[in-house]
Image (cartoon, rainbow, N blue to C red):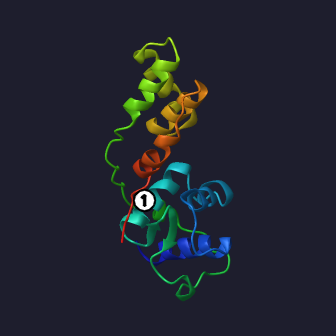
Amino acid sequence: MGSEEKIILAFIFSRSGKEKLTLSEIYLPLSMDLKWFSPKQAKDFVNQALERKLLVKRDGLIKTGFDIKNVEIPVGFHPSIKTFEQKKYEKVEDFEKTENIVTGILKKTNLSEEKILEKIREVEKEKNICFDVAALLVGKEYGVSLEDFFEEVEDKIFIENKE
């Protein structure tokens, strides 16, 4: 990632007024508030920034891996399109807990595993979200206790860097 990526991150952190942010406090402004990214592009951008240590995750919060005070943000800054399209991003390894979510739904309902997987895929396509998040939404719909799966889903979506 070059200087434009550092400017984007410095902008988000400066705008928030905080030194540490949650993952959603980074990718949601990029996609929803500023409309610089699609939600998927924003998540991919955050993943790549974590992978390249421009962002560092500690205790569930994210901070920059560089001093944002040393980054000059031009007035009226808007990132170029090539920033978002420059690379294909690596996928994080497959999520192992999805099977447990499906099992939880099976126990709560009279639906077959095929019907549950079909429902998850429908939600995935309809909301344009990853399969694992769709599984959580379907599980919630059927009243399955999902708190044990949140961290694993988050780790699947965002690369975890430990120092």
**Residue occupied by mark 1:** 47
Q: Nearer the viewer, residue 147 or 122?
A: 147
Q: Residue furthest bottom?
A: 70
Element type at marker 1?
Answer: helix
In this rendering, the count of numbered labels is: 1
Please, what is the three-letter code of the amino acid marked with disc 1? Asn
| Image quarter hosting the C terminus | bottom left
> At 34% from the left edge and 49% from the top edge, which residue is drawn?
91
**Residue 114 place in picture, x, y as percent:** 41, 16
Is residue 89 shown left or right of residue 66? left
**Residue 5 place in picture, x, y as percent:** 48, 71
Crowd band around label 1 with a 10 angstrom C-alpha radius: few (<14), some (14–19), many (20+): many
> At 50% from the left edge and 49% from the top edge, which residue is drawn?
40
Is residue 56 shown left or right of residue 69? left
Q: Nearer the viewer, residue 19 or 30?
A: 19
Classify 142 as above or below 129: above
Is residue 135 shown left or right of residue 21? left
**Residue 87 place in picture, x, y as percent:** 37, 59
Classify 32 as above or below 106: below
**Residue 45 place in picture, x, y as percent:** 46, 60
> At 57% from the left edge and 85% from the top edge, which residue is drawn?
72
Classify 59 as above or below 97: below
| Image quarter hosting the N terminus | bottom left
Classify 97 as above or below 120: below
